[in-house]
Image (cartoon, grey):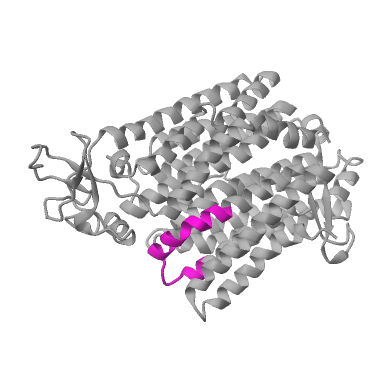
Protein backbone atom coordinates (compact mmCIF):
# COMPACT_ATOMS: atom_id res chain seq x y z
CA UNK A 1 0.00 0.00 0.00
CA UNK A 2 1.15 3.53 -0.78
CA UNK A 3 1.55 5.19 2.64
CA UNK A 4 2.94 8.50 1.43
CA UNK A 5 -0.35 10.40 2.02
CA UNK A 6 -0.31 9.29 5.66
CA UNK A 7 3.41 10.01 6.11
CA UNK A 8 2.81 13.49 4.72
CA UNK A 9 0.57 14.35 7.69
CA UNK A 10 1.94 12.05 10.40
CA UNK A 11 5.59 13.19 10.13
CA UNK A 12 4.97 16.74 11.46
CA UNK A 13 2.40 15.38 13.95
CA UNK A 14 4.99 13.08 15.53
CA UNK A 15 7.58 15.82 15.17
CA UNK A 16 5.42 18.18 17.23
CA UNK A 17 5.15 15.60 20.02
CA UNK A 18 8.85 14.78 20.04
CA UNK A 19 9.87 18.44 19.77
CA UNK A 20 7.85 19.26 22.86
CA UNK A 21 9.29 16.34 24.84
CA UNK A 22 12.87 16.98 23.72
CA UNK A 23 12.81 20.41 25.36
CA UNK A 24 13.24 18.64 28.70
CA UNK A 25 16.60 17.37 27.47
CA UNK A 26 17.96 20.15 25.26
CA UNK A 27 16.00 23.06 23.74
CA UNK A 28 18.01 23.09 20.52
CA UNK A 29 16.85 19.55 19.75
CA UNK A 30 13.35 20.92 19.12
CA UNK A 31 14.47 22.82 16.05
CA UNK A 32 16.36 19.93 14.47
CA UNK A 33 13.49 17.52 15.11
CA UNK A 34 11.06 19.94 13.51
CA UNK A 35 13.41 20.40 10.55
CA UNK A 36 13.67 16.63 10.08
CA UNK A 37 9.90 16.16 10.26
CA UNK A 38 9.24 18.95 7.75
CA UNK A 39 11.88 17.54 5.38
CA UNK A 40 10.17 14.13 5.46
CA UNK A 41 6.77 15.75 4.90
CA UNK A 42 8.07 17.81 1.95
CA UNK A 43 9.62 14.72 0.36
CA UNK A 44 6.34 12.82 0.82
CA UNK A 45 4.40 15.70 -0.77
CA UNK A 46 6.72 15.65 -3.78
CA UNK A 47 6.29 11.89 -4.14
CA UNK A 48 2.51 12.17 -3.87
CA UNK A 49 2.37 14.82 -6.61
CA UNK A 50 4.46 12.61 -8.87
CA UNK A 51 2.24 9.59 -8.21
CA UNK A 52 -0.96 11.55 -8.87
CA UNK A 53 0.39 12.94 -12.12
CA UNK A 54 1.47 9.47 -13.21
CA UNK A 55 -1.40 7.29 -11.98
CA UNK A 56 -4.35 9.53 -11.11
CA UNK A 57 -6.22 10.24 -7.88
CA UNK A 58 -4.99 8.57 -4.67
CA UNK A 59 -7.66 7.33 -2.24
CA UNK A 60 -6.08 6.47 1.11
CA UNK A 61 -8.32 4.86 3.72
CA UNK A 62 -7.29 5.66 7.28
CA UNK A 63 -6.98 2.44 9.33
CA UNK A 64 -8.42 0.54 6.35
CA UNK A 65 -12.01 1.69 6.94
CA UNK A 66 -13.86 2.19 3.66
CA UNK A 67 -15.85 5.39 3.06
CA UNK A 68 -18.44 6.66 3.70
CA UNK A 69 -18.06 5.22 7.24
CA UNK A 70 -14.28 5.60 7.30
CA UNK A 71 -12.14 8.71 6.92
CA UNK A 72 -10.49 9.01 3.53
CA UNK A 73 -7.56 11.07 2.32
CA UNK A 74 -8.38 11.79 -1.32
CA UNK A 75 -5.59 13.44 -3.27
CA UNK A 76 -6.06 14.60 -6.86
CA UNK A 77 -4.06 17.01 -9.00
CA UNK A 78 -5.40 20.12 -7.27
CA UNK A 79 -4.66 19.28 -3.66
CA UNK A 80 -1.43 17.45 -4.55
CA UNK A 81 -0.15 20.80 -5.84
CA UNK A 82 -1.39 22.63 -2.73
CA UNK A 83 0.13 19.99 -0.42
CA UNK A 84 3.56 20.45 -1.99
CA UNK A 85 3.15 24.22 -1.71
CA UNK A 86 2.36 23.98 2.02
CA UNK A 87 5.17 21.53 2.81
CA UNK A 88 7.77 23.46 0.79
CA UNK A 89 6.94 26.85 2.31
CA UNK A 90 6.84 25.35 5.81
CA UNK A 91 10.29 23.77 5.31
CA UNK A 92 11.97 26.83 3.77
CA UNK A 93 10.47 29.12 6.42
CA UNK A 94 11.65 26.82 9.19
CA UNK A 95 15.19 26.98 7.79
CA UNK A 96 14.99 30.78 7.94
CA UNK A 97 13.43 30.94 11.40
CA UNK A 98 16.14 29.72 13.76
CA UNK A 99 17.80 33.12 14.20
CA UNK A 100 14.57 35.10 14.48
CA UNK A 101 13.05 32.65 16.98
CA UNK A 102 16.18 32.87 19.11
CA UNK A 103 15.95 36.65 18.95
CA UNK A 104 12.20 37.00 19.60
CA UNK A 105 11.43 34.16 22.02
CA UNK A 106 14.55 32.34 23.26
CA UNK A 107 12.72 31.05 26.33
CA UNK A 108 9.73 29.74 24.33
CA UNK A 109 11.41 28.32 21.24
CA UNK A 110 10.46 24.70 21.95
CA UNK A 111 6.80 25.65 22.32
CA UNK A 112 7.00 27.58 19.06
CA UNK A 113 8.42 24.64 17.09
CA UNK A 114 5.83 22.21 18.48
CA UNK A 115 2.90 24.50 17.68
CA UNK A 116 4.42 25.37 14.29
CA UNK A 117 4.30 21.72 13.29
CA UNK A 118 0.73 21.32 14.55
CA UNK A 119 -0.25 24.29 12.40
CA UNK A 120 1.31 22.58 9.37
CA UNK A 121 -0.44 19.31 10.27
CA UNK A 122 -3.77 21.13 10.20
CA UNK A 123 -3.09 22.72 6.82
CA UNK A 124 -1.90 19.47 5.26
CA UNK A 125 -4.77 17.48 6.73
CA UNK A 126 -7.58 19.80 5.67
CA UNK A 127 -6.08 19.94 2.17
CA UNK A 128 -5.85 16.15 1.84
CA UNK A 129 -9.06 15.05 3.55
CA UNK A 130 -12.09 13.80 1.68
CA UNK A 131 -14.42 14.07 4.68
CA UNK A 132 -16.50 17.15 5.54
CA UNK A 133 -16.42 16.71 9.32
CA UNK A 134 -12.75 15.79 9.34
CA UNK A 135 -12.22 19.06 7.45
CA UNK A 136 -13.84 20.94 10.34
CA UNK A 137 -11.62 19.18 12.90
CA UNK A 138 -8.49 20.02 10.94
CA UNK A 139 -9.57 23.64 10.47
CA UNK A 140 -9.84 23.84 14.26
CA UNK A 141 -6.40 22.28 14.73
CA UNK A 142 -5.00 24.89 12.39
CA UNK A 143 -6.89 27.71 14.10
CA UNK A 144 -6.02 26.71 17.67
CA UNK A 145 -2.32 26.45 16.88
CA UNK A 146 -2.40 29.79 15.04
CA UNK A 147 -4.11 31.51 18.00
CA UNK A 148 -1.29 30.29 20.24
CA UNK A 149 1.48 31.26 17.84
CA UNK A 150 0.08 34.75 17.22
CA UNK A 151 -0.13 35.33 20.98
CA UNK A 152 3.61 34.63 21.24
CA UNK A 153 4.33 37.81 19.25
CA UNK A 154 4.35 41.46 20.31
CA UNK A 155 3.78 41.36 24.07
CA UNK A 156 1.61 44.50 24.05
CA UNK A 157 -0.57 43.93 20.99
CA UNK A 158 -0.35 40.26 19.98
CA UNK A 159 -2.51 38.79 22.80
CA UNK A 160 -5.38 41.15 21.95
CA UNK A 161 -4.99 40.42 18.23
CA UNK A 162 -5.08 36.69 18.99
CA UNK A 163 -8.19 37.12 21.15
CA UNK A 164 -9.95 39.01 18.38
CA UNK A 165 -8.95 36.24 15.96
CA UNK A 166 -10.35 33.63 18.39
CA UNK A 167 -13.75 35.32 18.61
CA UNK A 168 -14.14 35.70 14.86
CA UNK A 169 -12.55 32.33 14.10
CA UNK A 170 -14.99 30.52 16.38
CA UNK A 171 -17.90 32.20 14.58
CA UNK A 172 -16.52 31.09 11.22
CA UNK A 173 -15.96 27.51 12.37
CA UNK A 174 -19.44 27.40 13.89
CA UNK A 175 -21.05 28.49 10.63
CA UNK A 176 -19.16 25.81 8.73
CA UNK A 177 -20.06 23.10 11.27
CA UNK A 178 -23.75 24.07 11.17
CA UNK A 179 -23.65 23.83 7.38
CA UNK A 180 -22.11 20.37 7.56
CA UNK A 181 -24.85 19.40 10.01
CA UNK A 182 -27.54 20.39 7.51
CA UNK A 183 -25.83 18.40 4.78
CA UNK A 184 -25.52 15.36 7.03
CA UNK A 185 -29.20 15.53 7.98
CA UNK A 186 -30.29 15.44 4.35
CA UNK A 187 -27.64 13.05 2.94
CA UNK A 188 -26.69 10.84 5.90
CA UNK A 189 -23.03 10.99 4.86
CA UNK A 190 -19.92 13.10 5.49
CA UNK A 191 -17.69 11.75 2.71
CA UNK A 192 -17.34 14.47 0.05
CA UNK A 193 -17.72 12.18 -2.96
CA UNK A 194 -20.68 10.39 -1.40
CA UNK A 195 -22.40 13.67 -0.45
CA UNK A 196 -21.85 15.00 -3.98
CA UNK A 197 -23.53 11.96 -5.56
CA UNK A 198 -26.56 12.30 -3.27
CA UNK A 199 -26.91 16.08 -3.73
CA UNK A 200 -27.36 15.71 -7.49
CA UNK A 201 -30.90 14.46 -6.96
CA UNK A 202 -32.00 16.96 -4.29
CA UNK A 203 -30.50 20.26 -5.41
CA UNK A 204 -33.80 22.10 -4.98
CA UNK A 205 -33.92 21.37 -1.23
CA UNK A 206 -33.92 24.35 1.15
CA UNK A 207 -31.76 22.33 3.55
CA UNK A 208 -29.06 22.02 0.86
CA UNK A 209 -29.25 25.78 0.25
CA UNK A 210 -28.95 26.49 3.98
CA UNK A 211 -26.02 24.10 4.33
CA UNK A 212 -24.24 25.65 1.36
CA UNK A 213 -24.69 29.23 2.61
CA UNK A 214 -23.49 28.36 6.11
CA UNK A 215 -20.45 26.44 4.87
CA UNK A 216 -19.39 29.14 2.41
CA UNK A 217 -19.95 31.94 4.94
CA UNK A 218 -17.80 30.10 7.49
CA UNK A 219 -15.02 29.62 4.94
CA UNK A 220 -15.22 33.29 3.89
CA UNK A 221 -14.72 34.34 7.52
CA UNK A 222 -11.71 32.05 7.79
CA UNK A 223 -10.20 33.38 4.56
CA UNK A 224 -10.85 37.03 5.58
CA UNK A 225 -12.94 38.01 2.57
CA UNK A 226 -13.89 41.69 2.84
CA UNK A 227 -15.81 42.82 4.91
CA UNK A 228 -15.14 39.75 7.08
CA UNK A 229 -11.43 40.57 7.21
CA UNK A 230 -11.25 42.58 10.44
CA UNK A 231 -9.25 39.93 12.32
CA UNK A 232 -6.47 39.63 9.74
CA UNK A 233 -4.39 42.88 9.74
CA UNK A 234 -3.58 42.91 13.45
CA UNK A 235 -3.17 39.13 13.67
CA UNK A 236 -0.59 39.04 10.88
CA UNK A 237 1.12 42.30 11.88
CA UNK A 238 1.73 41.45 15.54
CA UNK A 239 2.47 37.73 15.15
CA UNK A 240 6.09 36.58 15.63
CA UNK A 241 8.07 37.09 12.43
CA UNK A 242 8.76 33.36 12.06
CA UNK A 243 5.03 32.58 12.16
CA UNK A 244 3.85 35.59 10.14
CA UNK A 245 6.00 34.31 7.27
CA UNK A 246 3.97 31.09 7.06
CA UNK A 247 0.48 32.09 8.19
CA UNK A 248 0.30 35.04 5.77
CA UNK A 249 1.04 33.07 2.58
CA UNK A 250 -0.79 29.86 3.51
CA UNK A 251 -3.79 30.32 5.81
CA UNK A 252 -6.00 32.37 3.51
CA UNK A 253 -4.88 30.54 0.35
CA UNK A 254 -5.71 27.14 1.83
CA UNK A 255 -9.15 28.48 2.76
CA UNK A 256 -9.59 29.59 -0.86
CA UNK A 257 -8.66 26.03 -1.84
CA UNK A 258 -11.35 24.71 0.54
CA UNK A 259 -13.92 27.01 -1.09
CA UNK A 260 -12.94 25.77 -4.56
CA UNK A 261 -13.08 22.17 -3.31
CA UNK A 262 -16.60 22.61 -1.97
CA UNK A 263 -17.71 24.34 -5.17
CA UNK A 264 -16.31 21.74 -7.56
CA UNK A 265 -16.28 18.44 -5.67
CA UNK A 266 -19.24 18.67 -3.27
CA UNK A 267 -21.89 21.00 -4.74
CA UNK A 268 -20.86 21.16 -8.40
CA UNK A 269 -20.90 23.93 -10.98
CA UNK A 270 -24.49 23.23 -12.06
CA UNK A 271 -25.85 23.86 -8.59
CA UNK A 272 -23.76 26.99 -7.97
CA UNK A 273 -24.07 28.73 -11.32
CA UNK A 274 -27.49 27.55 -12.50
CA UNK A 275 -29.61 26.62 -9.48
CA UNK A 276 -28.37 29.32 -7.09
CA UNK A 277 -27.50 32.10 -9.54
CA UNK A 278 -25.45 33.99 -6.91
CA UNK A 279 -22.35 34.48 -9.02
CA UNK A 280 -22.96 38.15 -9.87
CA UNK A 281 -23.38 39.09 -6.20
CA UNK A 282 -20.18 37.29 -5.18
CA UNK A 283 -18.17 38.83 -8.01
CA UNK A 284 -19.31 42.32 -6.91
CA UNK A 285 -18.26 41.38 -3.37
CA UNK A 286 -14.87 40.36 -4.75
CA UNK A 287 -14.57 43.71 -6.56
CA UNK A 288 -15.26 45.49 -3.26
CA UNK A 289 -12.58 43.35 -1.57
CA UNK A 290 -10.01 44.15 -4.26
CA UNK A 291 -10.58 47.90 -4.14
CA UNK A 292 -10.99 48.15 -0.37
CA UNK A 293 -7.84 46.10 0.26
CA UNK A 294 -5.85 48.21 -2.19
CA UNK A 295 -6.94 51.57 -0.79
CA UNK A 296 -6.51 50.44 2.84
CA UNK A 297 -2.98 49.29 1.98
CA UNK A 298 -2.33 52.71 0.47
CA UNK A 299 -3.20 54.35 3.80
CA UNK A 300 -0.61 52.41 5.85
CA UNK A 301 2.85 53.52 6.95
CA UNK A 302 3.92 50.14 8.37
CA UNK A 303 5.17 47.48 5.95
CA UNK A 304 3.55 44.49 7.65
CA UNK A 305 0.19 46.24 7.88
CA UNK A 306 0.45 47.21 4.22
CA UNK A 307 1.19 43.62 3.23
CA UNK A 308 -1.75 42.40 5.34
CA UNK A 309 -4.16 44.62 3.42
CA UNK A 310 -2.64 43.50 0.13
CA UNK A 311 -3.62 39.96 1.19
CA UNK A 312 -7.22 41.19 1.61
CA UNK A 313 -7.00 42.55 -1.94
CA UNK A 314 -5.56 39.30 -3.33
CA UNK A 315 -8.32 37.25 -1.72
CA UNK A 316 -10.76 39.23 -3.85
CA UNK A 317 -8.83 38.14 -6.97
CA UNK A 318 -9.24 34.45 -6.17
CA UNK A 319 -12.85 34.58 -4.97
CA UNK A 320 -13.92 36.63 -7.98
CA UNK A 321 -12.11 34.33 -10.39
CA UNK A 322 -13.67 31.23 -8.88
CA UNK A 323 -17.18 32.72 -9.13
CA UNK A 324 -17.00 34.07 -12.70
CA UNK A 325 -18.28 30.73 -13.91
CA UNK A 326 -15.86 29.78 -16.67
CA UNK A 327 -12.81 27.53 -16.86
CA UNK A 328 -10.43 30.36 -17.78
CA UNK A 329 -11.24 32.37 -14.67
CA UNK A 330 -11.20 29.27 -12.46
CA UNK A 331 -7.78 28.43 -13.91
CA UNK A 332 -6.60 31.92 -12.96
CA UNK A 333 -8.04 31.59 -9.45
CA UNK A 334 -6.34 28.23 -8.83
CA UNK A 335 -3.05 29.41 -10.35
CA UNK A 336 -3.24 32.50 -8.14
CA UNK A 337 -3.49 30.28 -5.04
CA UNK A 338 -0.02 29.02 -5.92
CA UNK A 339 1.38 32.34 -7.13
CA UNK A 340 0.04 34.52 -4.33
CA UNK A 341 1.33 32.12 -1.69
CA UNK A 342 4.83 32.37 -3.18
CA UNK A 343 4.65 36.15 -3.61
CA UNK A 344 3.39 36.76 -0.08
CA UNK A 345 6.00 34.37 1.30
CA UNK A 346 8.81 36.27 -0.43
CA UNK A 347 7.48 39.63 0.79
CA UNK A 348 7.20 38.48 4.40
CA UNK A 349 10.66 36.89 4.24
CA UNK A 350 12.06 40.25 3.16
CA UNK A 351 10.06 42.04 5.87
CA UNK A 352 11.36 39.51 8.40
CA UNK A 353 14.96 40.22 7.40
CA UNK A 354 14.39 43.95 7.84
CA UNK A 355 12.76 43.43 11.24
CA UNK A 356 15.65 41.23 12.34
CA UNK A 357 18.10 44.02 11.62
CA UNK A 358 16.05 47.16 12.26
CA UNK A 359 13.49 45.93 14.83
CA UNK A 360 10.65 47.76 13.02
CA UNK A 361 9.34 48.08 9.47
CA UNK A 362 7.67 51.46 9.38
CA UNK A 363 8.32 53.17 6.08
CA UNK A 364 10.74 55.65 7.67
CA UNK A 365 12.84 52.69 8.85
CA UNK A 366 13.41 51.62 5.24
CA UNK A 367 15.49 54.66 4.30
CA UNK A 368 18.79 53.67 2.73
CA UNK A 369 18.05 49.94 2.77
CA UNK A 370 19.34 49.43 -0.77
CA UNK A 371 22.78 50.37 0.58
CA UNK A 372 22.62 48.56 3.92
CA UNK A 373 20.64 45.45 2.90
CA UNK A 374 21.01 45.09 -0.89
CA UNK A 375 20.28 41.35 -1.10
CA UNK A 376 17.14 41.63 0.99
CA UNK A 377 15.94 44.56 -1.09
CA UNK A 378 16.64 42.66 -4.32
CA UNK A 379 14.27 39.92 -3.16
CA UNK A 380 11.75 42.51 -2.00
CA UNK A 381 11.80 44.26 -5.39
CA UNK A 382 11.25 41.01 -7.28
CA UNK A 383 8.34 40.06 -5.01
CA UNK A 384 6.85 43.54 -5.34
CA UNK A 385 7.05 43.41 -9.13
CA UNK A 386 5.31 40.04 -9.04
CA UNK A 387 2.48 41.45 -6.92
CA UNK A 388 2.11 44.29 -9.42
CA UNK A 389 2.01 41.73 -12.24
CA UNK A 390 5.21 42.40 -14.20
CA UNK A 391 6.29 39.56 -16.52
CA UNK A 392 8.01 37.14 -16.36
CA UNK A 393 7.15 36.86 -12.65
CA UNK A 394 4.33 34.51 -11.72
CA UNK A 395 1.91 37.26 -10.67
CA UNK A 396 1.49 38.36 -14.28
CA UNK A 397 0.30 34.99 -15.56
CA UNK A 398 -2.46 34.33 -13.03
CA UNK A 399 -3.71 37.91 -13.46
CA UNK A 400 -3.73 37.36 -17.21
CA UNK A 401 -5.97 34.31 -16.85
CA UNK A 402 -8.24 36.23 -14.48
CA UNK A 403 -8.53 39.13 -16.94
CA UNK A 404 -9.30 36.76 -19.82
CA UNK A 405 -11.91 35.02 -17.68
CA UNK A 406 -13.47 38.36 -16.73
CA UNK A 407 -13.78 39.41 -20.37
CA UNK A 408 -15.15 35.97 -21.29
CA UNK A 409 -17.85 36.34 -18.61
CA UNK A 410 -18.57 39.96 -19.49
CA UNK A 411 -17.53 41.02 -15.97
CA UNK A 412 -15.82 44.26 -16.99
CA UNK A 413 -16.15 45.66 -13.47
CA UNK A 414 -13.99 42.79 -12.21
CA UNK A 415 -11.43 43.37 -14.95
CA UNK A 416 -11.34 47.08 -14.07
CA UNK A 417 -10.81 46.23 -10.40
CA UNK A 418 -7.86 43.99 -11.31
CA UNK A 419 -6.23 46.76 -13.32
CA UNK A 420 -6.86 49.43 -10.67
CA UNK A 421 -5.44 47.20 -7.93
CA UNK A 422 -2.30 46.56 -9.99
CA UNK A 423 -1.85 50.33 -10.35
CA UNK A 424 -2.36 50.80 -6.61
CA UNK A 425 0.25 48.12 -5.91
CA UNK A 426 2.63 49.87 -8.31
CA UNK A 427 2.17 53.12 -6.37
CA UNK A 428 2.74 51.33 -3.06
CA UNK A 429 5.87 49.44 -4.01
CA UNK A 430 7.54 52.16 -6.05
CA UNK A 431 7.00 54.51 -3.13
CA UNK A 432 8.89 52.02 -0.94
CA UNK A 433 11.59 51.55 -3.57
CA UNK A 434 12.05 55.33 -3.67
CA UNK A 435 12.34 55.56 0.13
CA UNK A 436 14.80 52.68 0.33
CA UNK A 437 16.97 53.86 -2.58
CA UNK A 438 16.96 57.65 -2.58
CA UNK A 439 16.32 58.70 1.02
CA UNK A 440 19.12 58.63 3.56
CA UNK A 441 18.65 57.28 7.10
CA UNK A 442 17.68 59.76 9.79
CA UNK A 443 20.50 60.67 12.14
CA UNK A 444 18.73 59.39 15.19
CA UNK A 445 19.24 56.63 17.67
CA UNK A 446 17.65 53.23 17.45
CA UNK A 447 14.67 52.24 19.54
CA UNK A 448 16.90 50.86 22.27
CA UNK A 449 18.66 54.20 22.66
CA UNK A 450 22.02 53.21 21.14
CA UNK A 451 24.10 55.93 19.55
CA UNK A 452 26.40 53.80 17.41
CA UNK A 453 25.46 51.05 14.98
CA UNK A 454 21.97 49.68 15.33
CA UNK A 455 21.45 46.58 17.41
CA UNK A 456 20.83 44.41 14.36
CA UNK A 457 24.05 45.57 12.69
CA UNK A 458 26.06 44.88 15.85
CA UNK A 459 24.54 41.42 16.17
CA UNK A 460 25.09 40.67 12.50
CA UNK A 461 28.71 41.71 12.70
CA UNK A 462 29.32 39.61 15.80
CA UNK A 463 27.51 36.57 14.39
CA UNK A 464 29.62 36.65 11.25
CA UNK A 465 32.83 36.90 13.25
CA UNK A 466 33.43 40.51 12.24
CA UNK A 467 34.46 43.08 14.82
CA UNK A 468 32.86 46.48 14.92
CA UNK A 469 36.09 48.19 13.84
CA UNK A 470 36.45 46.10 10.66
CA UNK A 471 32.83 46.09 9.49
CA UNK A 472 32.48 46.66 5.75
CA UNK A 473 31.37 50.16 4.78
CA UNK A 474 30.31 51.81 1.56
CA UNK A 475 30.95 55.44 0.72
CA UNK A 476 27.79 56.45 -1.12
CA UNK A 477 29.54 59.33 -2.93
CA UNK A 478 32.87 57.87 -4.01
CA UNK A 479 31.56 54.27 -4.43
CA UNK A 480 34.64 52.95 -2.62
CA UNK A 481 34.85 50.69 0.42
CA UNK A 482 35.86 52.39 3.63
CA UNK A 483 36.56 51.40 7.21
CA UNK A 484 33.93 51.69 9.92
CA UNK A 485 34.44 53.96 12.85
CA UNK A 486 33.22 52.81 16.23
CA UNK A 487 33.05 56.35 17.54
CA UNK A 488 29.95 58.20 18.65
CA UNK A 489 29.84 59.94 15.26
CA UNK A 490 28.24 56.83 13.82
CA UNK A 491 24.45 56.80 14.05
CA UNK A 492 22.23 53.89 14.96
CA UNK A 493 21.26 53.48 11.29
CA UNK A 494 24.87 52.69 10.45
CA UNK A 495 25.56 56.11 8.87
CA UNK A 496 28.79 57.80 9.88
CA UNK A 497 28.22 61.52 10.31
CA UNK A 498 31.87 62.45 10.78
CA UNK A 499 33.68 63.79 7.69
CA UNK A 500 35.70 61.26 5.71
CA UNK A 501 39.25 62.57 6.04
CA UNK A 502 40.34 61.13 2.72
CA UNK A 503 37.50 62.54 0.66
CA UNK A 504 35.83 65.17 2.80
CA UNK A 505 32.41 63.58 2.48
CA UNK A 506 29.86 63.10 5.23
CA UNK A 507 28.03 59.82 4.73
CA UNK A 508 29.42 56.32 5.01
CA UNK A 509 26.88 53.52 5.19
CA UNK A 510 27.31 50.20 6.95
CA UNK A 511 26.31 47.19 4.88
CA UNK A 512 24.62 44.98 7.48
CA UNK A 513 22.61 42.13 5.98
CA UNK A 514 20.46 39.49 7.64
CA UNK A 515 22.02 36.09 8.47
CA UNK A 516 22.83 33.75 5.59
CA UNK A 517 20.01 31.31 6.41
CA UNK A 518 17.43 34.09 6.07
CA UNK A 519 18.99 35.41 2.86
CA UNK A 520 19.10 31.92 1.37
CA UNK A 521 15.40 31.37 2.09
CA UNK A 522 14.55 34.71 0.49
CA UNK A 523 16.68 33.80 -2.52
CA UNK A 524 14.83 30.51 -2.97
CA UNK A 525 11.45 32.24 -2.66
CA UNK A 526 12.43 35.01 -5.11
CA UNK A 527 13.75 32.50 -7.63
CA UNK A 528 10.52 30.52 -7.37
CA UNK A 529 8.58 33.61 -8.51
CA UNK A 530 10.42 33.64 -11.82
CA UNK A 531 10.50 29.87 -12.31
CA UNK A 532 6.78 29.53 -11.53
CA UNK A 533 6.07 32.31 -14.00
CA UNK A 534 8.16 30.70 -16.72
CA UNK A 535 6.50 27.32 -16.16
CA UNK A 536 2.96 28.63 -15.71
CA UNK A 537 1.94 27.06 -18.99
CA UNK A 538 3.20 23.66 -17.89
CA UNK A 539 1.40 23.97 -14.53
CA UNK A 540 -1.86 24.83 -16.29
CA UNK A 541 -1.50 22.11 -18.94
CA UNK A 542 -0.42 19.30 -16.59
CA UNK A 543 -2.19 20.08 -13.31
CA UNK A 544 -4.96 22.69 -13.38
CA UNK A 545 -6.37 21.93 -16.83
CA UNK A 546 -6.65 18.14 -16.33
CA UNK A 547 -8.22 18.69 -12.89
CA UNK A 548 -10.94 20.99 -14.27
CA UNK A 549 -11.55 18.57 -17.15
CA UNK A 550 -12.43 15.70 -14.81
Q: Quick check: can you spot residue 311?
A: no
The quadrant of the picture occupied by the C terminus is top right
Residue 437 rendering spot, x and y as whole percentages: 30, 34
The residue stretch that appears in magenta: 90-112
Q: Residue at x 57, y 77 (%)?
A: 21
The answer to whether 236 appears left or right of 253 in the picture is left
Between 159 and 12, which is closer to the camera in this rendering? 12
Between 153 and 90, which is closer to the camera in this rendering? 90
Q: Residue at x 62, y 55 (%)?
A: 171
Residue 428 rendering spot, x and y as whole percentages: 40, 32
Between 437 and 264, which is closer to the camera in this rendering? 437
Q: Note whether 321 is above or below 303 in the view shown.
A: above
The answer to whether 474 appears left or right of 264 in the picture is left
Splitting the image into 4 quarters, where does residue 197 fall?
A: top right
Q: Residue at x 50, y 33 (%)?
A: 387
Splitting the image into 4 quarters, where does residue 477 fall?
A: top left
Residue 206 rendering spot, x and y as whole percentages: 82, 43
The answer to whether 487 appears left or right of 248 in the picture is left
Q: Note whether 80 is above or below 429 in the view shown.
A: below
Splitting the image into 4 quarters, where does residue 402 fall?
A: top right
Amino acid sequence: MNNMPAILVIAPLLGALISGLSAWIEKKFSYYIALTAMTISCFAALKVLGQVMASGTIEYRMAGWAPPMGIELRIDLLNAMVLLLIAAIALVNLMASFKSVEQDMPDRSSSFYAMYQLFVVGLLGLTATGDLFNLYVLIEITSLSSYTLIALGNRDRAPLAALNYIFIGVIGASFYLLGVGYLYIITGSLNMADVASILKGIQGSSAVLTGFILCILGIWIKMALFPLHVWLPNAYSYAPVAFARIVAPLMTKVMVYVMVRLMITVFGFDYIFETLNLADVVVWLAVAAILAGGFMALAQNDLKKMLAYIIVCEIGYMVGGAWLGNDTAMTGAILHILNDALMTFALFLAAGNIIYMKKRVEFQDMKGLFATMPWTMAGFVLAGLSIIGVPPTCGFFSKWYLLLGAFEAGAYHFAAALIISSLLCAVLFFKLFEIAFFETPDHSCDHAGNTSMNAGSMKSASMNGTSMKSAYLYDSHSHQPAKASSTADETCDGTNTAPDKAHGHHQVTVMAEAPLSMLAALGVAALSLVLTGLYSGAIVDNIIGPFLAL
